[in-house]
């Protein structure tokens, strides 16, 4: 707490010192040079072969992310914020289950090849009170649950891991 207050005081003092009282010049939106974009540099057509015979400038799968393997199922966690109940659900790919007012369908679970315990990418479709439109449809990542989270006033749902057997 004391560290936070000291940091806040240092930031406020630094901002006060940085101000010298002069006003910034006005911005003329009619100036044609204001929105001029710098010309792009020319790109050579032939850069020659890249690693492993691929052409330079192309992106390989290993450049983006490691290859993913589809698991037979996955485990997700559901928190009911009102009752405080926490449930871990292990589902097979394509399976659905009912938890309170939620209907949860696990479409697919993937993990990095060669590292089944490394991370989990889970495709979920979640319906509330059997509504025709889902309240969530997309991929959840176990290592970053806030990246693509279920936004609901009563329930929190996040991916835990893929099942490998």
Image (tube, rainbow, N blue to C red):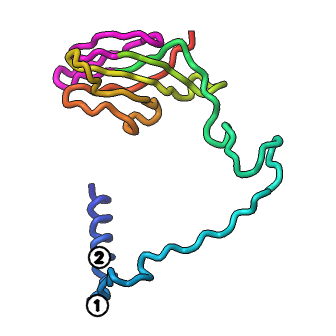
Say if 38 sits above or below 33 in the image: above
Give the residue at x 32% y 83%.
27
Is 117 on the left-hand or right-hand side of 53? left
Is label 2 in contact with label 1 (beta carbons under 8 Å)? no
What is the quadrant of residue 165 in the picture?
A: top right
Say if 63 sits above or below 155 in the image: below
Please tell me which residue lies in front, 15 or 69.
69
Dominant SS in magenta: strand
Is 48 on the left-hand or right-hand side of 43? right
Q: Which residues are magenta?
A: 78-104
Give SS at disc 1.
loop
Measured from the top left, where is residue 144 in percent x and y?
44, 36
What is the quadrant of residue 137 in the picture?
A: top left
Measured from the top left, where is residue 81 in percent x and y?
21, 26
Question: What crowding class fits label 2: few (fewer than 14 Cα within 10 Å), some (14-19), or many (20 or more)?
Answer: few
Residue that lies at the very extreme toward the bottom in this rendered image: 22
Is 114 on the left-hand or right-hand side of 10? right
Give the residue at x 54% y 23%.
110
Is 146 on the left-hand or right-hand side of 22? right
Q: Dot 2 corresponds to which residue?
A: 13
Please tell me which residue lies in front, 3 or 157.
157
Give the residue at x 27% y 54%.
1
Please tell me which residue lies in front, 8 or 46.
46
Give SS at disc 2.
helix
What is the quadrant of residue 32 in the picture?
A: bottom left
Q: Dot 1 corresponds to which residue?
A: 22
Q: CA distance from mark 2 to mark 1?
A: 18 Å
Measured from the top left, where is residue 95 in percent x and y?
41, 9
């Amino acid at each position: 707490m004391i560290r936070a207050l000291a940091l806040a005081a240092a930031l406020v003092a630094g901002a006060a010192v940085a101000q010298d009282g002069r006003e910034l010049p006005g911005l003329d939106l009619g100036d044609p040079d204001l929105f001029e974009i710098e010309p792009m540099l020319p790109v050579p057509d032939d850069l020659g072969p890249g690693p492993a015979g691929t052409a330079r400038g192309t992106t390989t799968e290993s450049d983006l992310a490691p290859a993913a393997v589809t698991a037979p199922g996955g485990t997700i966690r559901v928190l009911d914020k009102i009752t405080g109940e926490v449930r871990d659900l292990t589902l097979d790919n394509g399976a659905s289950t009912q938890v309170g007012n939620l209907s949860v369908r696990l479409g697919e679970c993937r993990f990095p090849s060669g590292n089944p315990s490394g991370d989990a990418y889970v495709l979920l479709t979640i319906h509330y009170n059997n509504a025709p439109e889902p309240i969530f449809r997309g991929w959840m990542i176990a290592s970053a649950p806030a990246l693509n989270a279920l936004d609901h006033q009563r329930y929190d749902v996040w991916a835990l891991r893929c099942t490998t057997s």
